[in-house]
Amino acid sequence: MAQLESTSSELVLDVRSLCVDFDTKSGPVRVLDDISFTLKAGSTLGIVGESGCGKSMTALALMGLIPSPPGRISGGEILLYGEDLVTAGKKRLRQLRGDKISMIFQEPMTSLNPVYSIGNQVSESIIYHQNVGKKEARERTIELLRLVQIPAPERRVDEYPHQLSGGMRQRVMIAMALACEPSVLIADEPTTALDVTVQAQIFELLLEIQKRRDIAIILISHDMGAIAELADDVVVMYAGHKIEEGSAIDVINNPHHPYTQGLLRCMPDIEEDFNKGRQPLFEIVGNVPDLADRGSGCPFAPRCSARFDKCSSLPETLSLQGGRRVKCWLASDAMALSRGITDE
């Protein structure tokens, strides 16, 4: 059995050509297609895209929580310090989940059990993974609640989810995910349904904990503004494909894929609104395609104003300078033209 210890390369997670299929009445449907990325200790990777693009499914695959049946990982590797989670057995995955890799789920009110106290739910993972008694687990739970800045943790530990605000429940979810000091923390839309002030507090808390514990974070979001503020690198997903990848600064300042450009245009511009009055937000026309019927071409082509003949076939991923990658015929043709290459 591989030992999960950090190495000098700092590489914590290495996802290679991950594919996930779901069985349907009309046959298998691919919901994740050839997803690859890496994650280093202390860094934050943003995964961004609209609902239905495959962000949460990627997170479930990393956690070994794909509902089976009907879903399954049909290809690829998920290497956590070199150990492949795809081929790991159920017992091994239970040992790793919550201990070495944890997840903050979207909806704390539905993720927390309403009939168990906060203390019982946080301490459960501590007792299971660290083999300690209930008294010590309770003490650690109070410390965790204090770490995530929940006031009066000695009292809150005995309260129930309905007695806490939405922001407090989300902090409890973070405490649960951090209970065993994981190497990788997946935050799946961690500020859903929270107001802007509380969102900022949650993001600030995650960054503070990351610096303190050198945790690698995967931040899943549809909000390019949050990605711009928090992520070191970004993966843009659409219809189960990785369509653009690179450092967050490069992707945001110079997006190559029309979909990434559209996501960035959807962000409100406060300065422009102040100078010119409130402007209508940009809208990407259409919807994410049904994965069972997305065709063989570029999945974004039906919504893309820049589409042309080549888009009827699926583009290959083009590697650019600085670790940038983009899956778009426009970028491929632009690169060819810059090198003086034509189809003739």
Image: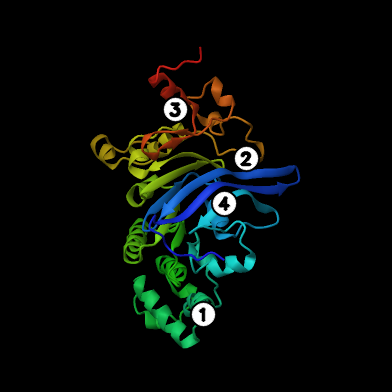
> Which residue has dot 2 on it?
290
> Which residue has dot 1 on it?
127
Provide residue 168's location: percent of width, then percent of height.
Answer: 40, 69
Disc with the residue nearer the chain's start (4 vs 1): 4
Residue 55 - label: none
Disc with the residue nearer the chain's start (4 vs 3): 4
Q: Report how far apart the C-alphas of labels 3 and 2 lie in the structure.
A: 25 Å
Q: Residues within 10 Å of mark 4 (few under 14, many from 20)?
A: many
Pick the front one: 147 or 317: 317
Residue 331 - label: 3
Element assignment for label 2:
loop
Q: Report how far apart the C-alphas of labels 3 and 1 lie in the structure.
A: 52 Å
Q: Report how far apart the C-alphas of labels 2 and 1 lie in the structure.
A: 43 Å
| Quadrant that contains the N terminus | bottom right
Pick the front one: 311 or 273: 311
Q: Quarter of the image holding residue 194? A: bottom left
Element assignment for label 3:
helix
Residues at circles 4 and 3 in contact by the CB criterion of under 8 Å: no
The answer to whether residue 16 of the structure is visible from this angle is: yes
Disc with the residue nearer the chain's start (3 vs 2): 2
The kind of residue on which mark 1 rests is Ile
Q: Residue furthest left?
A: 275
Pick the front one: 110 or 180: 180
> Which residue has dot 4 on it?
77
Q: Report how far apart the C-alphas of labels 4 and 1 lie in the structure.
A: 30 Å
Q: Report how far apart the C-alphas of labels 4 and 2 lie in the structure.
A: 26 Å
Q: Residue at x 51, y 12 (%)?
A: 344
